[in-house]
Image (cartoon, helix red, strand yellow):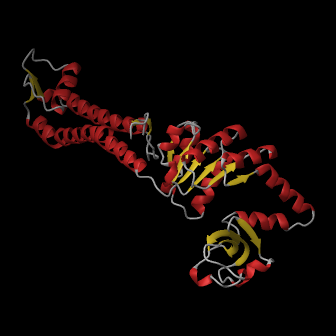
Amino acid sequence: MDLHLLRRGGRKPGHVLRRALKVPVWADLGLRLGAAFGLVAIVVLVHWIDRAGLKDTHDGQISFLDVVYFTMISITTTGFGDIAPVSDRSRLIEAVIVTPIRIAVLFIFVGTAYNFIIKRSWERFRMAQIQKNLTNHIIVLGFGVSGSEAVAELIARGTSPECIVVIDPSEARLEAASRLGCNVMAGDATRDATLLDVNVDKASAILVSAGRDDTSILITLTARHIAPGVPISTVVRAADNEGLARQAGASTVINPVRFTGLLMAGSAHGTHVADYITDLASIEGRVQLVERTVTAAEVGKSLSALSSGRGLRIYRDGGTIGFWEPAAAELKAGDVIVEITPTPA
């Protein structure tokens, strides 16, 4: 689907979401036109072979040009009457062979008009409505190495691709995201209008990975300004920029370089530490880290008494409580816990 403009609430036009097409537009059009011209060529061949059964009232001679002319007016059902089938065989050919081909060509052209005008217009309208009503979705700003891995992991964990919106200025990256089934939009995520077009304030999470720390921090600042209550995870690669990302409004700051260093340092003192951390981070591992709110049935119990997994940490009133601390002996309503649980089979 081509990019089209959308105007809402008096704001400047933004881009409409897109989803992947099963067949590219140019390929679809080429196949349809190829089929139509192929059928026309068959009719020309049939008429040329049976030209003795045709009569030209103009000069009495049937040339190849006359055959092409008669084929076109026959296929289009124009029928001027200057050339007509006169033999029984020619009339049988027109009834049995040419008429079905004429109907097939007509359906091809009608189907093409429907697909490229009516259907695609409806798809654009439908995507605009989806865009207008987006809520509780995950927005991925930047589909580079980190962004694409995050989307793949989200899908592996059960998130529907239709609930993921990817924004990136690169058409090649958007094509890769659309093949996964995600909604995609070409645009500059540092601009308010781009984020407003995907209802950033109604998202469940925002993942920022622009490839450059300065761009990622600017995107985070823009997103936090528009969506003050939405969790934002930002990827930065320089340790000095972690604090800036938090000041810009990132709820979580991820430094892949530092994380890689931690894995390498852990592997220096034990061969299994890095494996276990990797196991925790991926849905393909045997265990996974889960963050959730304490249920009513768990209130009053200790963090170590969880039946769903091994409790590690409690987040309460802006602070953190480790499993070894006395406060972890009693869970309270509103607590957010982090636990290790077995990966579902």
- Residue drawn at the location 23% of the way across and 21% of the way down: 64
| Quadrant housing residue 33 | top left
In this rendering, would 332 be left or right of 21? right
> Taking 215 as reference, is 51 above or below it?
above
> Taking 316 as reference, is 178 above or below it?
above
| Residue 221 visible, this orientation | yes
The N terminus - image quarter: top left
**How far across and how far down the image is residue 338, in percent?**
69, 70
| Quadrant housing residue 111 | top left
> Taking 181 as reference, is 159 above or below it?
below
The C terminus - image quarter: bottom right
- Residue drawn at the location 9% of the way across and 17% of the way down: 60
Question: Which residue lies most toward the top here?
Answer: 59
**How far across and how far down the image is residue 52, in percent?**
15, 27
**How far across and how far down the image is residue 145, in percent?**
68, 46
- Residue drawn at the location 54% of the way across and 42% of the way down: 175
| Residue 181 visible, this orientation | no
In this rendering, would 342 be left or right of 69? right
Foreground residue among 33 and 325: 325
Question: Which residue lies most toward the right here?
Answer: 269
Foreground residue among 49 and 80: 80
- Residue drawn at the location 67% of the way across and 45% of the way down: 248
**How far across and how far down the image is residue 115, in percent?**
31, 42
